[in-house]
Image: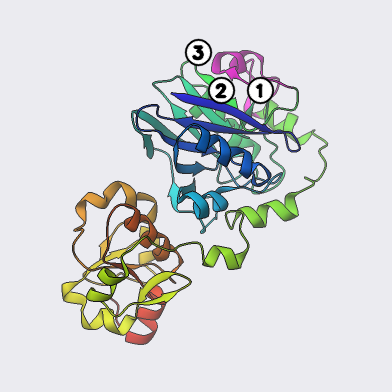
Amino acid sequence: MIFRQLIDKESSTYTYLLADPDSKEALLIDPVREQFQRDHQLIAELGLTLRYTLETHMHADHVTASGLFRQKLRSESVVSINAGADCASRHVQSGDKLQLGEIVLLVIETPGHTNGCISFYLPAQGMVFTGDALLIRGCGRTDFQQGSAGRLYDSIHHNIFKLPEETLIYPGHDYHGRTVTSVGEEKRHNPRLGGGKSKIEFKSIMQGLKLGYPRKMDEAVPANLQCGLPTAQLDSDFEPQLSPNAVDSWAPIHRRNGVPEVSKAWVKENESRLQIVDVREQSEHLELPPISTAICIPLAHLADQLKQLTKGKGTVLVCKSGRRSARACDLMAQHGFEHVASMTGGMLSWHQQSGSCG
């Protein structure tokens, strides 16, 4: 495995580059906007194809470069389903897997520092990337962004400390020049969570911390909820790599910020011959029921379930309002689906205008 540990000195943030040496597929964990050129150059020098950017949580101390990488290199941005970042290409949760050639990463939810904290575990390599949840001889603070000392204690003890003790821990930050630790080390020596400390002791420790307000929080958190991009760039971020002739031959396409769209009225008229894919979460179906003929695949799982879809068939992607379906168009185009379009206005438009419960 190709592996690099990179640092942004201003925020003491570690960014990790992982790549499969055979397929040359790569990912970045917690990329920093100010280091975009550095990381972009390294990817090019190593001859890699960036497939994913992964966020361990919504950061309060730096702005992510995930949106920039998606614009420039067509990578997928990946965040927790609980992070609140609708901008992301994929939303993941415990049990989900990401794969680069022979490299498999397992998603482990580790909330407590924030609701949307996740860690990435590579069992074959004996590595886990814990973000801010578990640091070297420390942990993330729990006094903002839905922080909870009790949840963090459970996350670490139930999900990280149960990994093999030799597992190497790569944290999101270190402020003392340290680069790596292990599960066994932290179980024994972490002054907040290790040494057999109880949950009550941990809560007392966290409540006693006198920490200042994060300097970049008011800028970083809103920006990271938009993948580090201004709204105007976010809306124009997706231009599927489609053949215009192929698109125009199957549907009356119009383009909004580069995204191919079809009207709700046209979809209703042609519903029986279309492949309609609803990329909303299951929980959203109670408020706005799916179109009766729709195949329901949440956006977070779409890449893994493309085999059940027919490539040559006209495909309409729908979500609540149209933003996620635009990302779904981009994803499917990258995987060779030519006849794809988003339905303008999404299911809000479908129910408002048609009166149908789908």
Residue that numbered label 1 is attached to: 136
Q: Which mark is residue 169?
A: 2
Residue at image x 63%, y 62%?
A: 230
Where is residue 89? Give x, y as percent.
45, 53
Image quadrant in which you'd find residue 94: top left
Residue 14 left/right relative to 215: left
Image quadrant in which you'd find residue 337: bottom left
Residue 257 left/right relative to 173: left
Residue at image x 39%, y 73%?
A: 346
Secondary structure of the residue carrying numbered label 2: strand
Q: Earlier in the sequence, mark 1 or mark 3?
A: 1
Magenta span: 177-199
Label 2 close to label 3 by CB (< 8 Å)? no
Distance from disc 2 to disc 1, alpha carbons, whole Å, reads 8 Å
Where is residue 343? Give x, y as percent.
35, 74
Where is residue 5? Give x, y as percent.
59, 27
Q: State the scheme by which the image is colored.
A: rainbow
Taking depth in this image into account, of 195 and 280 the one nearest to the observer is 280
Q: Which mark is residue 166?
A: 3
Q: Which mark is residue 155?
A: none
Image quadrant in which you'd find residue 210: top right
Label 2 close to label 1 by CB (< 8 Å)? yes
Q: Amino acid at mark 3?
A: Glu
